[in-house]
Image (cartoon, grey):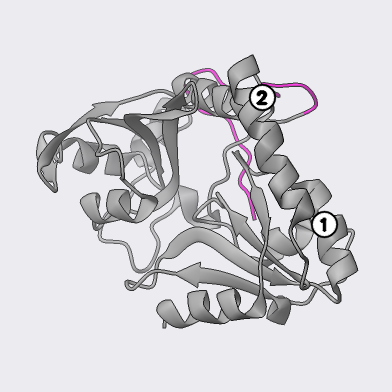
Amino acid sequence: MFYRGKYMDGGDGREMGPKRQRILDQPPSFYGASAGSSFMYNAAPYADAGQPPPFPVIRLRGLPFDCTEADVTEFLHGLDIVDVLFVRKNGRFSGEAFVVLCYPLQVDFAIQKNRQNMGRRYIEVFRSKRQEYYKAIANEVSEARGGSPRRSARARSYDEGKDSAQHTGVLRLRGLPFSAGKDDIMDFFKDFVLSEDSVHITLNMDGRPTGEAFVEFANPEDSKAAMSKDRMTLGSRYIELFPSSHEELDEAVSRGR
């Protein structure tokens, strides 16, 4: 589930937009070392100082314009990534991204990647702050909801295409936090009857979550009704929903095996 806490840079988890709470989701092991992690986080220095740990977020600049979350995960190989947020301006990728890590100590390891290459491009890595990350989330949600006339026209056309698509009872979810589990997705669709077997989180070749999932509903009518959740938030991310099919589901699941 999602950790809701306070960090030393001043954030207190209150909402950043109308009726939407901008709380970063964190895995339960945030304050301790996970068994499989190479980077052990020692909370003692913060405990002795009587203050919570800093918010573990970095900023990447100079990313290729066809960059994916999988590319960022590979670039930061060995670090535990909670979230990747690509920064867009006027609907276009800016070449920057925020990456939230599991442990504050991992920020130091990530900084060592500064000016290392992703493909033919070298990537700049900076320390960032919770406020900067949340501001980027707010901008993303604003654009998705038609924050500018130009974006609004595209969004209307995009939504009309979704509305006219044929439903088969399967929806594809995009933009999931990497730490989201089946229980979180079932809670997102809590108005519908789902089981764990009906939720399929897709993985890449390394066995890491891709940020996508497929959900099988009881019938096409339910999947169509569930589209009302399109662009609602799960944790800190707004989730895009797309009508899909069992064939697309099977293909996506088989790629991660």
Viewer-closest of 167 and 61: 167
Look at mark 2 in the image and give the residue it sits on: 152
**Magenta stretch secondary structure, dominant:** loop
Amino acid tagged 1: Ala
x then y, percent, for residue 237: 59, 41
Does dot 1 land on a helix, a strand or a loop?
Answer: helix
What residue do we see at 57% from left, 74% from top?
A: 248
**Mark 1 nearby-residue class (10 Å; few <14, some 14–19, many ≥20):** some
Part of the protein shown in magenta: 1-19
x then y, percent, for residue 81: 39, 50
Look at mark 1 in the image and give the residue it sits on: 226
**Mark 2 nearby-residue class (10 Å; few <14, some 14–19, many ≥20):** some
x then y, percent, for residue 62: 22, 30
x then y, percent, for residue 247: 60, 80
- Residue 254 visible, this angle: yes
Taking 253 as reference, is 144 above or below it? above
Taking 50 as reference, is 56 above or below it? below
Does dot 2 land on a helix, a strand or a loop?
Answer: helix
- Residue 190 visible, this angle: no
Viewer-closest of 54 and 124: 124
Q: Quadrant of the C terminus?
A: bottom left
Question: Is 191 positioned to the left or the right of 121 in the image?
Answer: right
What residue do we see at 62% from left, 58% from top?
A: 173
What residue do we see at 38% from left, 73% from top?
A: 207
Residue 1 figure quarter? bottom right
Taking 157 as reference, is 37 above or below it? below
Check residue 18 for magenta coloring: yes
